[in-house]
Amino acid sequence: MALSEFELIERYFTGVGTGRDDVILSVGDDTALVAPHAGRHLALSLDTLVAGVHFPVDAPAETVGYKSLAVNLSDLAAMAAEPAWLLLALTLPQADPDWLEHFAGGLATLANEAGMALVGGDISRGQALTVTVQVAGYSDRPLRRDGARPGDGLYISGTLGDAALGLKLWQGGQREGSDACFLIERLHHPNPRITLAQALADLANAAIDVSDGLLADAGHLANRSAVAVTIEPHRLPLSPALRRSAPATQATILALTGGDDYELCLSLPLEREREAQARAEEIGVKLTRIGRVVEGNGVQLVSPTGEKTAYEYSGYKHFC
């Protein structure tokens, strides 16, 4: 017998996430009730993921649940926010109990890791599988996009290009071998840099998460800060798996333009570099200087010999 949306919510999504003392009323009523801590700023973000657009239609349900929260946590990370609550809206072509169980499991895994509580949402029937997650948290020392200053260094966390190649491998059915598994894992299970952002909140001047590709997102940061940024492609941190799996030129292009990395791009004063990298190392994250913030506008690529090339890459656009 088919379950109603209320029964689906009760079975799969009640109690997802961790218990929090600032949650007064959770899943099961017309609205959630939370009690934000006095004197703290709230950070809010929302993302919608559509099957075939934001994740492969054959992606495992667990990875869809995990990633739907991870991409939102990456936005909170870019603001150096502390995660607290989430809301979920789920549109399903059909209610498959096995799919829902694994989806909820992936969502719950990351919610528990992040200390979040699922406090409400909605389930409905529709033609395309669509997942919308709204997150909220506390941001006491926000890292905005508009704070980059000429003279800052430009830094990136982790490695770039892995998820873009992971998507190509997944779509091509190349899913065997340790390198392919690593790259596909980077696609399906991005690591939101919440802890890193909080560790660097008092050092960095600006931040943005890299979701649409480094060139596109660094360009957004430059535009909002009314500055230019230079990027030195030879400095880009590439994983060993990416280097082994793609020619050098292709690997660099993937690192510059590939989406879904969800790493942090930050600007911070050069004199704070060692301290920032030491803090990053303490939490197990590599922080690499890849360029500079300078006067002007836009993004410039700089060769090892110092030659500059203006480059514009707008990233993925839904309606173009």
Image: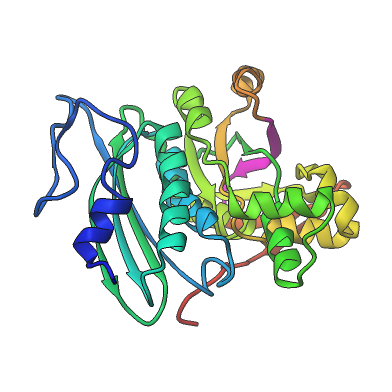
Q: Front-most of 18 and 150?
A: 18
In-image side of 11 versus 165 (left or right): left
Q: Which residue is at a point 45% across and 22% down the rendered structure image? A: 202
Relative to 237, is 310 above or below? below
Q: Front-most of 54 and 20?
A: 20
Q: Is residue 161 visible?
A: no
Relative to 63, is 312 above or below? below
Q: Residue furthest left?
A: 30
Verify whether residue 288 appears in magenta: yes
- Give the residues drawn in magenta, as a range: 286-296
Estimate the x, y position of residue 159 in percent, counting from the top left: 71, 43
Q: Front-most of 173 and 8?
A: 8
Q: Which residue is at a point 27% across and 30% down the rendered structure image? A: 19
Q: Residue furthest front?
A: 1
Q: Please name the predominant secondary structure of the magenta segment in the image.
A: strand
Verify whether residue 1 appears in magenta: no
Relative to 313, is 195 above or below? above
Relative to 197, is 313 above or below? below
Estimate the x, y position of residue 51 in percent, counting from the top left: 49, 72
In-image side of 268 versus 319 (left or right): right
| Number of disc labels | 0
Q: Which residue is at a point 67% across and 55% down the rendered structure image? A: 163
**Quarter assignment of residue 84:** top left
**Quarter assignment of residue 22:** top left
Q: Is residue 152 visible?
A: yes
Quadrant where the N terminus lies?
bottom left
Q: Front-most of 117 and 149?
A: 117
Q: Which residue is at a point 73% across and 67% down the rendered structure image? A: 168
Estimate the x, y position of residue 165 in percent, counting from the top left: 74, 60
Estimate the x, y position of residue 26 in percent, counting from the top left: 17, 42
